[in-house]
Structures are given as structure tokens and as C-alpha cells.
Image (cartoon, rainbow, N blue to C red):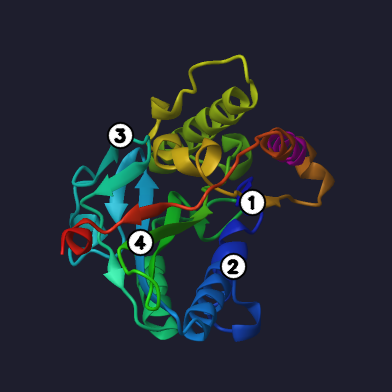
């Protein structure tokens, strides 16, 4: 979910906690996944969730036993494996048996998120948040050595902002600089991915692009929601968001199933 500050990205992703009717994409995705899991009797599916916040280029674990304000932001590291897949070392993954447990994790993470007040938005997100649902499925009928790994990244990006319009100063200005820089790197990565002649895509320029490497140019299907302000006053930012969305449309990915063999079972 991409767009300028106060255009409703967090509302799109998580929705309103007061009214079930206005629930966002993440609660709906959780509901859909557990409905699907419940209907597949021939498959054993394990569901785990993780919630990561990228704040001022530091990584915070929203589901850790240690509250975010006590975390240093350096305990989680981003690792690449031999296939080029990205893994998060040190990130808490919680196994959820039902929809309620997964929603509890989401709400717990939401309360830990960093927000601040600016001229456009009372609770402006000052960080990028990535809520990930990890699925591991194996058939109960066929040979159980085959394991399919799937991952759904639900990303609520912080809004790109004109600091003049938001009246940012002090800490909020520092946060805005980090946010705008990482979003400009994200744009560079998208442009590089579209250019077939380029051999190098600069994923490692910032934490956001490094973590979302799989979601932009990897083995995935990606949907971008562009949030815009309909007011004439914000025309420039709206055009900028739409330009980014146009670039994103040019990224082509071919997704395949991540099938692995469960080694201990295979040996057995």
C-alpha cells in the first residue's frame, strides 16, 4: 500500500478496530486463509505470523516479548540464502491455530507501532510495517516428505511527505527524511527491475528494499494499492503516486510453487 501521508494506507491495510464492517485487508486476508485451511481436509497446513517495523532504518519486532521501546533495532538481521531468497534472522514467528489468534497478533503489533501527529494526520505512521503470514503445507494422503512453503507479505508503507505541508520538525523531520529516502530507493529498485538491460538491481541500498526483494522482483505475485488524495491542493503528490504505480505495473514476475523436501522425513 503506497501513497502520500494521510491518504488512508493504514486504514486500507488494517481498517477500523471499532467497526467490523470497516476491517482492512489484513483481517480479511487472515479470515480467507483460515477458511481455506479449514476446508482442505487432505492437507496439513501450519500457519505462522510475524510483524516487523522498519523505523529510521532500524528493525523492530512487534511480536517480541521485549517491548519495542526497549529493543535496540539491531537484533534482527536480513540474510540471503543460496537461492537468493530473503530470511529474517531473530524475528519472532508465532504459530496460530485459528483466525482469532492471528488477529490478536495483528492487534498486539498495531498497538506497538510508532505514530506521530502532523498537520495532515493525527496518527501518521512513522514506519513501514510488514505483517507476514507464513504457510507450510504437506499432504496427508500422498507422501508427506513434500513441503510447500508460501508467504504472504502485507505491507503498509509509511507515507511520502512534503515536510512543508506536514510541518515536520525535530524528530518528525528526521523520520520524514528516512521515510522519503527509503521510498525513493524503492522507486529506484522498481525502475531497475523493469529495465531488462540492467544486470544489477540495488536491493541492498536500504532495509525496506532488501526485505521486499522477493516481493518486487522475486518469485511472487504482487499487488500495489495506490492511495491518493482527491483534493487539488495535493495534485503534485497524487501525480507522483500514480507515476510510481505505473512503473510498478511494468514489473513482470513468473511465480512458481516453492516445493521442498522435508529432509528428516526423507531419511526416515
Answer with left or right where residue 198 lies relative to residue 7: left
For marks 3 and 4 on the same chain, the one whose residue lies earlier in the sequence:
3
Secondary structure of the residue carrying numbered label 3: loop
**Residue topped by disc 4:** 146
**Residue topped by disc 1:** 223
In the depicted structure, whether residue 39 falls above or below residue 231: below
Q: Give percent across and percent down for residue 196.
A: 63, 20
Image depth: mark 3 or mark 4 in front: 4
In the depicted structure, whether residue 149 falls above or below residue 18: above
Give the camera-side residue of 169 and 67: 67
Residue 170 inside the magenta-drawn segment: no
- Residues under labels 1 and 2: Cα distance? 12 Å
Residue positioned 25% across, 61% down in the render: 92
Image depth: mark 2 or mark 3 in front: 3
- Residues under labels 3 and 1: Cα distance? 26 Å
Question: Disc 4 vs disc 1: Cβ atoms closer than 8 Å?
Answer: no
Amino acid at each position: 500500500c503506497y501513497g502520500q501521508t494521510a491518504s488512508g494506507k493504514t486504514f486500507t491495510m488494517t481498517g477500523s478496530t471499532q467497526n467490523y464492517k470497516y476491517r482492512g485487508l489484513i483481517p480479511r486476508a487472515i479470515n480467507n486463509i483460515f477458511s481455506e485451511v479449514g476446508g482442505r481436509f487432505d492437507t496439513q497446513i501450519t500457519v505462522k505470523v510475524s510483524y516487523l517495523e522498519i523505523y529510521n532504518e532500524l528493525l523492530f519486532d512487534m511480536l517480541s516479548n521485549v517491548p519495542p521501546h526497549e529493543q535496540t533495532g539491531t537484533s534482527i538481521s536480513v540474510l540471503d540464502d543460496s537461492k537468493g531468497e530473503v530470511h529474517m534472522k531473530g524475528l519472532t514467528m508465532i504459530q496460530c491455530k485459528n483466525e482469532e489468534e492471528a488477529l490478536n497478533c495483528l492487534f498486539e503489533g498495531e498497538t506497538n507501532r510508532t505514530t506521530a501527529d502532523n498537520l495532515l494526520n493525527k496518527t501518521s505512521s512513522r514506519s513501514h510495517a510488514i505483517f507476514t503470514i507464513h504457510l507450510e503445507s504437506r499432504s496427508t494422503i500422498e507422501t508427506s516428505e513434500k513441503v510447500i512453503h508460501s508467504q504472504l507479505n502485507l505491507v503498509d508503507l509509511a507515507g511520502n511527505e512534503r515536510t512543508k505541508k506536514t510541518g515536520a520538525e525535530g524528530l518528525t523531520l528526521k523520520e520524514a527524511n528516512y521515510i522519503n529516502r527509503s521510498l525513493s530507493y524503492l522507486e529506484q529498485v522498481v525502475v531497475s527491475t523493469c529495465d531488462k538491460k540492467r544486470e544489477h538491481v540495488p536491493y541492498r541500498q536500504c532495509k525496506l528494499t532488501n526485505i521486499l526483494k522477493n516481493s518486487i522482483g522475486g518469485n511472487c505475485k504482487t499487488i500495489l494499492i495506490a492511495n491518493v488524495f482527491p483534493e487539488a491542493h495535493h495534485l503534485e503528490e497524487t501525480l507522483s503516486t500514480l507515476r510510481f504505480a505505473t512503473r510498478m505495473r511494468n514489473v513482470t514476475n513468473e511465480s512458481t510453487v516453492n516445493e521442498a523436501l522435508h529432509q528428516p522425513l526423507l531419511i526416515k
